[in-house]
Amino acid sequence: MSGFSIDWLDLREDADRRARDSDLCERAVHWLQLAPSRGREAIVVDLGAGTGSTLRALDGAGQRPLLWRLLDHDPALLAEARRRHGGQTGIETFAADLSDIGTLPLDGARLVTASALFDLVSAEFLQALAQVLQRPAGQDPIGVYSALNYDGLTQWTPSHPLDDVVLEAFNCDQRRDKGFGPALGPEAAGAMCDAFSQAGFRVFSASSPWVLDGADEPLVSALITGIAAAVAGSPGVAVSSLEDWVRFRQAQVTSGSCTVGHTDLLAVPDPASAHATV
Ligand SMILES: C[S@@+](CC[C@H](N)C(=O)[O-])C[C@H]1O[C@@H](n2cnc3c(N)ncnc32)[C@H](O)[C@@H]1O
């Protein structure tokens, strides 16, 4: 099991959709539209697809018929994706462990997508993925659209004296191994830029923060609970101080606000170009 519940993915989906950088999203769709036609759909492979949030975020964008391959190692999430989209054509699900890159069904892909995934993986995974996606001789080029990579910055209003300590401990927890080797956590965007630039891709990035307020109460409340669970027992985080922080944060959940930083990236093959920010 992945540890990502349907409830949690549902809670975050609306905030994710609002946060996605629209320009990069449009560029990703444009990349799909430009795919050589050859009388068939353009293939999108969504890594760590969960219940299909990336598919829903890009739904209806562009005119080109698409074939979505949703990959995840959690059969319950893929079953939910099939339940939600089973009636639609052009959707396949694959139970797959992404860490076994060589076996992933990437053949014929025009675009590889991921959302809220690359902060879970290691630098070695991204380097290996970039190598695999380098244009093989005789095949069409593949782009990569990776949205909502946590960047390590969480800001709360109003502030609490323990905010910085909690954030530091949380960011430390973000680097724990999630099955791919030491996780990149807040370094995900930089590592993706490095790996894909070195492999001959042109990489565009843009910030895509969650901007949350009282209207997002269920998500913010779950976020507080999740952060507290992740940092409990960390050096420098006393039990009583953490309890005080949680009480304060939950009391502010409807009147306060919170920004959680993310970065979106789009990598397209272009041997002549270096990293660019849009
Ligand atoms: C944070 S969730 C994001 C899900 C989805 N992309 C979204 O934005 O709602 C990370 C996803 O990666 C999947 N995942 C984590 N490690 C994996 C692995 N080794 N192989 C396949 N999927 C994995 C999880 O099951 C989960 O669905």
Image: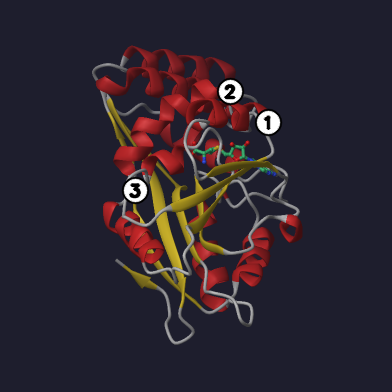
Residues at marks 3 and 2, CA–CA distance in whole angstroms: 25 Å
| SS type, badge 3 | loop
Q: Answer with mark 3 or mark 1, whichever residue precedes in sequence.
A: 1
Nearer the camera: disc 1 or disc 2: 1
For mark 3, does the 10 Å Cα neighbourhood hold few (<14), some (14 to 19), or many (20 or more) residues? many
Q: For the point 33% across and 63% down, which residue is it? A: 30
The answer to whether residue 47 shows anywhere in this view is: yes
What is the x, y in percent for residue 17?
A: 34, 39
Q: Quadrant location of the C terminus? A: bottom left
In the picture shown, does residue 157 fall above or below 276? above
In the picture shown, does residue 226 fall above or below 30? above
- Mark 2 Cβ inside 8 Å of ligand 1: no
- Mark 3 Cβ inside 8 Å of ligand 1: no
Q: Which residue is denoted by mark 1 in the rendering?
A: 75
Asked whether 89 or 56 is in front, the reply is 89
Residue 274 occupies which quadrant of the picture?
Answer: bottom left
Asked whether 107 or 252 is in front, the reply is 107
Q: Identify residue type, mark 1.
A: Pro
Question: Which of the labelled discs sits on residue 24, or is there none?
Answer: none
